[in-house]
Structure formats: structure tokens, C-alpha cells
Image (tube, rainbow, N blue to C red):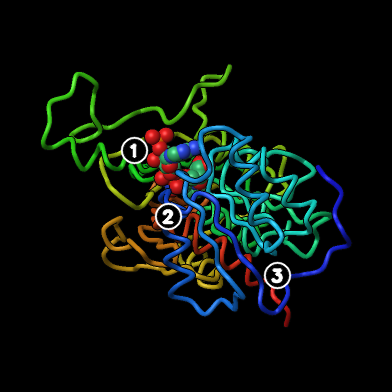
């Protein structure tokens, strides 16, 4: 990582740059910045078409605008983020990266709102933003960890929207009703694997949840596994979460613990669904129950759903950026 000036927060009227502003995440962020009263001196949105296909052209575009950057949001592919992060840091900018380029880099905080690695503890201005499932999931795990005197076993089964795979996959879902395709389309289907498999047979998405959870919760030996499915839904990642804690929790105790989590809505009656949470800035939780229906020792199951582009990405990043503003 490049050397940086001593750390301070953002100036009162920060110059913001969004790289990849025409991707799904970049567009959501631009929309949010227009809606919220973030005190920006300027907002520069740089679309993919201006960044070019290689790192050198992305860098040269950044160099053209870099003197004005206090905070850069990288809504880019990992290789593009790696290429532009260091030059931006060297200019003294804060850099919030949405890609997986730095998430497991021990030198770079993995920034989940309200979790232990907060921006105030940073040694430099680069923060990695978590996988889009995780801003919704981790505060829930953390609350149950505290209420239950420690997580013992966690299993996460996701049903993830097409938009989590980017603009091209979302467009193919929307178009697939109208066309015949030789490839197995997502419409009318479920894909049992998201991303490449590692040597253990875990998909990239499953590994993200597991490894980022261990890092964010600071529980390197946590017994956690994930199983991730891509489903034919445009926006909104849902997941069934199964949790066992050292002190058994019943559903009422879990509800009380989750009631204190910021930006979380509990649903006692109708379970929340992706269609209910689109463009919403919260995590929605319902169907809290005991695994075997009777014994708290058997653990808890719950259903959780959140908009992956807002709560899972853009809103989360903007909330983090707000913590860097002067008081
Ligand atoms: N989507 C989510 O829910 C989510 C949430 C959290 C974090 N993230 C991360 O955020 C980053 C951005 O994701 P996204 O979902 O916003 O991506 P996206 O919507 O797929 O945006 C990227 C789009 O820009 C195009 N593109 C990429 N590089 C280009 C280039 N150099 N020149 C011209 N066009 C280019 C791609 O086109 P082609 O497909 O034709 O190349 C793609 O359509 C990724 O690192 C992702 O992992 C995504």
C-alpha cells in the first residue's frame, strides 16, 4: 500500500468521485447521493466507458481528476480497484472499495458498520466494503453472538438476486422471457453455484461469507458454513440463517437482541420478501424459530432479506462515509 499523510477525516465539503458510476452499484450510489444530504463540495461520476478496459486507461482518467478527490468510491472490478487504489491513497483520498480486491487483506480494514474494524481505527485511508450479503448478515450474527455468550455454529443458506451478479446478469434475466437460449438461463431456474469453486469445493460467494464473517466478527475459529444459490429475482438477497450459541436463546430472546441492531426491521407476521425490500435501506428479519421447534438448545433459525444494491452496498458505503465527516 502506498504511503499516506497522517489520518484525518473528510473536510466539511468533500470532493467525491465515483468510479464505475454506470454499474448497478455505482448507479445506486449516485442515486442515493442525490437523495441524501451528504455535504459534498463536488460529485464526479466516472462511468465504465471512460475508464477503458485496462488498468492504465483507468489510471490516466483518475490522474485527470485526482487533484479534486477527498473520497473515492470504487464500484469497479477487483483488478481495476487494485490499479487505482494506491494512486488515490497517495493523493490523500479516502478510498472505499466495493470489490473483493482487499477484503481479506490483513492490512485493509473490512468495514462493516457497527463492527469492530471501524474507520476510526484505520492505519490508512483504504477501506474494503464487504460482500453484498454481509452488511445485512453480520450485525445479526454479532447481536446473537453477544446475547448468546458466543456463537458456536452458524449455517447460512442464501437465495441471491440476479443483480448481485452485475448489470449483464440482471439484463439477461429481464430479457430471457423473450428469447430462446442454448445456455441454462436463470429464469425458471436456480443456479447452485455463484462464482468459481475453491479447492474445498466452496463457491467464491460461499467463501466470501465464511471468511469475511470470521474476519469481521474476529472469530477465526468459528464453525460457519454457507450455501449460496442464485435465484430468478431481480433485486434482494434472502437467506436462511441457522445459529447455535453457547447460552441457548429462545426466539423471544433473539428478537430482543435483534431489536437493538441499527437499520434492522423485525417482522412478526408476514415474512419479508425481496419484492418488499427493493430500494429500502434496512435489513428485514422474520420467521425466528427454534431449529427443532421446541428446544432452545437445538439453536435458532431465521429468515433475512435485504436489497443487495442499497443496504448491501451503496447505503452501507454512504453510512460509512458519513462517519468520516467532521462532527
Ligand atoms: N451487484 C451487487 O449487488 C454488488 C454488491 C456489492 C459489491 N459489488 C461489487 O461492486 C463492483 C461493481 O459491481 P456491479 O454489480 O455494480 O457491476 P455491474 O453492474 O456489472 O457494472 C459493471 C458493468 O460495467 C461494464 N464494464 C465493466 N468494466 C468495463 C469497462 N472497463 N469498460 C466498459 N464497460 C465496463 C460491464 O460490462 P460487461 O459485463 O460487458 O463487461 C458491466 O455491465 C464489483 O466489484 C462487485 O463485486 C456488487
The Cα atoms of the two marked residues, 2 and 3, are separated by 22 Å
User: Which residue is painted at 46% across and 28% down in the image?
Assistant: 195
User: Which residue is painted at 30% across and 39% down in the image?
Assistant: 231
Q: Is mark 1 within 8 Å of ligand 1?
A: yes
Q: Which residue is mark 1?
A: 168
Q: Is residue 186 above or below residue 243?
A: above
The Cα atoms of the two marked residues, 2 and 1, are separated by 15 Å
User: Callout 1: helix, strand or loop?
Assistant: helix
User: Callout 3: helix, strand or loop?
Assistant: loop
Q: Position of residue 192 (x, y in %)?
A: 36, 28
Front in this rendered view, residue 203 or 146: 203
Q: Residues within 10 Å of mark 3 (few under 14, many from 20)?
A: some
Q: Is mark 2 within 8 Å of ligand 1?
A: yes
Q: Is residue 149 above or below residue 208?
A: below
Q: Which residue is mark 3?
A: 324
Of the residues tagged 2 and 1, which is closer to the observer? 1
Quick one: which residue is furthest to the front in this view? 64
Which corner quadrant of the figure contains ligand 1?
top left
The Cα atoms of the two marked residues, 1 and 3, are separated by 33 Å
User: Which residue is painted at 75% across and 45% down in the image?
Assistant: 86
Q: Which residue is mark 2?
A: 309
Amino acid at each position: 500500500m502506498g504511503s499516506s499523510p497522517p489520518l484525518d477525516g473528510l473536510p466539511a465539503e468533500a470532493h467525491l468521485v465515483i468510479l464505475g458510476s454506470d454499474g448497478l452499484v455505482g448507479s445506486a450510489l449516485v442515486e442515493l447521493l442525490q437523495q441524501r444530504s451528504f455535504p459534498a463540495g463536488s460529485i464526479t461520476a466516472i462511468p465504465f466507458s471512460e475508464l477503458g478496459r485496462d488498468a492504465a486507461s483507468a489510471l490516466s482518467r483518475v490522474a485527470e481528476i485526482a487533484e479534486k478527490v477527498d473520497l473515492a468510491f470504487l464500484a469497479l472490478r477487483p483488478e481495476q480497484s487494485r490499479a487505482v487504489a494506491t494512486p488515490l491513497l497517495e493523493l490523500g483520498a479516502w478510498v472505499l472499495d466495493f470489490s473483493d480486491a482487499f477484503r481479506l487483506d490483513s492490512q485493509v480494514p473490512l468495514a462493516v458498520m457497527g463492527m469492530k474494524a471501524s474507520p476510526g481505527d484505520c492505519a490508512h485511508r483504504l477501506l474494503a466494503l464487504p460482500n453484498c450479503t454481509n452488511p445485512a448478515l453480520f450485525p445479526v450474527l454479532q447481536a446473537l453472538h453477544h446475547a448468546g455468550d458466543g456463537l458456536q455454529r452458524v449455517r447460512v443458506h442464501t437465495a441471491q438476486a440476479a443483480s448481485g451478479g452485475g448489470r449483464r446478469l440482471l439484463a439477461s434475466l429481464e430479457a430471457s422471457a423473450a428469447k430462446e437460449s442454448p445456455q441454462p438461463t436463470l429464469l425458471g431456474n436456480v443456479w447452485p453455484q455463484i462464482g468459481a469453486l475453491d479447492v474445498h469445493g466452496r463457491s467464491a460467494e460461499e467463501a466470501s461469507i465464511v471468511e469475511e464473517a470470521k474476519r469481521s466478527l474476529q472469530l477465526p475459529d468459528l464453525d460457519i458454513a454457507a450455501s449460496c444459490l442464485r435465484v430468478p429475482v431481480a433485486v434482494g438477497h434472502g437467506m436462511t440463517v441457522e445459529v447455535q450459541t453457547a447460552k441457548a436463546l429462545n426466539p423471544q430472546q433473539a428478537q430482543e437482541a435483534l431489536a437493538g441492531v441499527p437499520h434492522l426491521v423485525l417482522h412478526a407476521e408476514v415474512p419479508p420478501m425481496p419484492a418488499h425490500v427493493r430500494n429500502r435501506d434496512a435489513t428485514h428479519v422474520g420467521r425466528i424459530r427454534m431449529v427443532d421447534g421446541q428446544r432452545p438448545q437445538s439453536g435458532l433459525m431465521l429468515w433475512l432479506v435485504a436489497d443487495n444494491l442499497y443496504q448491501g452496498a451503496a447505503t452501507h458505503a454512504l453510512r460509512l462515509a458519513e462517519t468520516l465527516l467532521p462532527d
